[in-house]
Image (spheres, helix red, strand yellow):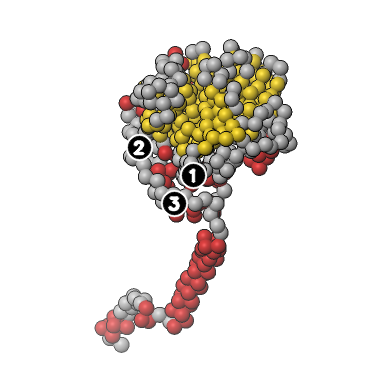
Amino acid sequence: MTEADGLRQRRPLRPQVVTDDNRTPEAKGGSSFSGRVFRATFLMLAAFLTIPLLGALVLLDSPIDPESLSFKEPPLFLGVLQPNTKLQQAERLFENQLVGPESIANIGDVMFTGTADGRVVKLENGEVETIARFGSGPCKTRDDEPACGRPLGIRAGPNGTLFVVDAYKGLFEVNPWEREVKLLLSSETPIEGRKMSFLNDLTVTRDGRKIYFTDSSSKWQRRDYLLLLMEGTDDGRGGQVPLQRPWPRAPAQQGSQMPHVTLCVGACSLLEYDTQTKEVKVLLDHLRFPNGVQLSPAEDFVLVAELAMVRIRRFYVSGLMKGGADVFVENLPGFPDNIRASSSGGYWVSMAAIRANPGFSMLDFLSERPYLKKVIFKLFSQETVMKFVPRYSLVLELSDSGAFRRSLHDPEGQVVTYVSEAHEHSGHLYLGSFRAPYLCRLRLQSA
């Protein structure tokens, strides 16, 4: 063998490039089989999840029949509305001694409120004392509310008594010193053929004769307030002609008298009760979730918060404008609850949910999409939906003309959460809540 022949035999082998063309049939077939298994498994899992969901959407009934509502763009959170943490300066009072102190009233320096377990309580010297109950039975869950009762709006009368509205039971006068309870108007009393399902707030004239109060719905009860808000309708009563007549006889309850009622056309939500004549009048109707009410300092008009429309309406009860109504303030930065007088001659308005701008407001987004509201409540409970509502508490002070004067915020709800009312007394703002296990006190001079 020559040297050249030896070099040719030792020539290095070229690397082999593997391509799909020269793969073995076994490898190619195995890879294809694995891909088909993965795709089949994924599709089966998707079908397993999707088919029940579609079935639920088709077969389940939605508890609400919402209407489409259109709002203006929310006001910018600038200037007076600039976010701050002033509410976080508040101190918590009576923590874990009461739950849901929705509304607050004072007789002198003694404070009173109603709680989620159906009690009206006195708050004095750091102690919580029960002075009245309007219902009975266990009061632990939302399903117990109709029997247990739920005191909401509370006001001090001129004679050392309290006027209280219970969402389920009616309108009461309570003597807190003697523990005496008098039923003024039962919620079972039908107004224009329908009973009052969700009594909410009240305001009383200085002489104690006239009580103005709201019935938030003739369909939904307080425990379903989120369904009422999401449905956004002005459900109510239908009348044909104005009519006044004595109310039909019914079994009398102790301390009560049969009321007279003045009927009017339409759904009725702002009402007047005369403590002397026992007459009930419907003042303003076709409201969407009417909530807090407040008399003007001159007692010539009543303000009523129309929560689902993010505005406050005004109804004139005396003077040249008597019987007329208009919008006091519209396009609020949040959903208004109770309204209370401020020492400046204006009004405090509490809001437990805001319409962030800049930002995203889920309730504004859903307002024009009723089909989405239906889907949500087909699939989720009210408690589940509430978990997605940001805990942003806002208290807004309005001037006597409805202009924004100042705002107090707790952006994360760290101290003040689910705020329902701002009650001013002796240089402090007492902050009620429809869910929190405490109430709060804020020194106004520091805010």
- Closer to the observer: label 3 or label 1? 1
Q: Which mark is residue 74?
A: 2
Inspect the image, locate mark 2, and give the three-letter code of the amino acid beneath it.
Answer: Pro
Foreground of the two, 146 or 355 = 146
Rendering coords of residue 304 (x, y %):
46, 30
Inspect the image, locate mark 1, and give the three-letter code of the amino acid beneath it.
Answer: Gln
Q: CA distance from mark 3 to mark 1?
A: 30 Å
Tell me the quarter of the picture where residue 317 sits.
top left
Q: Secondary structure at mark 1?
A: loop
Q: Which mark is residue 370?
A: 3
**Residue located 42% across and 39% down the image:** 309
Q: Secondary structure at mark 3?
A: helix
Q: In the drawing, does residue 379 fall left or right of residue 363? A: right
Residue neighbourhood size for the residue with mark 3, other residues' Cα within 10 Å, grouped as few (<14), some (14–19), many (≥20):
many
Q: Secondary structure at mark 2?
A: loop
Labels 1 and 2: the sequence-earlier one: 2
**Residue located 36% across and 42% down the image:** 71
**Residue located 71% across and 31% down the image:** 253
Rendering coords of residue 10 (x, y %):
32, 80
**Viewer can see residue 347:** no
Inspect the image, locate mark 3, and give the three-letter code of the amino acid beneath it.
Answer: Pro
Foreground of the two, 204 or 337 = 204
Q: Which mark is residue 240?
A: 1
Q: Which mark is residue 171?
A: none
Labels 2 and 3: the sequence-earlier one: 2
Q: In the drawing, does residue 88 fall left or right of residue 112? A: left
Q: CA distance from mark 1 to mark 2?
A: 38 Å
Rendering coords of residue 379 (x, y %):
54, 54
Tell me the quarter of the picture where residue 312 sits.
top left
